[in-house]
Amino acid sequence: MNTPDKERNTVTKRDLATRVRLAIKPDVKLHQAQVADVISHTLDAIRDALVNGNTVELRNFGVFKIEVRKERVGRNPKDPSVDIRIPERKVVKFRSGKEMKNQLEAAASTDT
């Protein structure tokens, strides 16, 4: 049976809320639902900023920005002789911050 590696598991918004709630100081009285609401509002704000053409920079984490992927010609794998025009479109790009890059490199070096 194929079991996913521990590192390949998906972290959901609910998982994030649980982790954040556990990381909050005990004297701060927030319920998990409130933390989940803050996370949702944060993600909504990031999305809205990107939709409005802004770049979102989170220091030591990374940068989200919108880039335009140029129009190109694709091929149908079932019929490679037919060209398919793939129109220009906007995509979200993420560039990790310095601190995250360092942590990812450190994690990769311990895996080998």
Image (cartoon, rainbow, N blue to C red):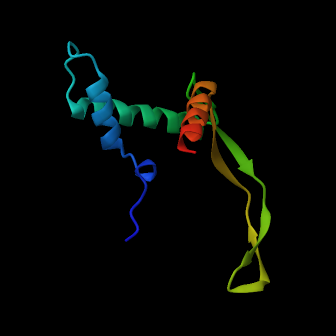
Residue 102 found in image quarter: top right
Picture coordinates of residue 9 (x, y %)? 40, 52
Instruction: Write the residue at 19% across / 19% down.
Output: 29
Confirm whether residue 36 shows in the render. Answer: no
Q: Is residue 61 above or below residue 82?
A: above
Q: Closest to the observer: 69 or 19?
A: 19
Picture coordinates of residue 93 (x, y %)? 64, 43
Picture coordinates of residue 44 (x, y %)? 44, 37
Q: Is residue 112 left or right of residue 90?
A: left
For the N terminus, the image quarter is: bottom left
Q: Is residue 109 left or right of residue 25?
A: right
Q: Closest to the observer: 72 or 112?
A: 112
Q: Closest to the observer: 88 or 6?
A: 6
Instruction: Write the residue at 57% across / 33% down.
Output: 106
Instruction: Write the residue at 32% across / 41% down.
Output: 15
Residue 36 found in image quarter: top left
Confirm whether residue 22 shows in the render. Answer: yes
Q: Closest to the observer: 62 or 68?
A: 62
Q: Is residue 30 left or right of residue 14?
A: left
Q: Is residue 11 above or below residue 57?
A: below
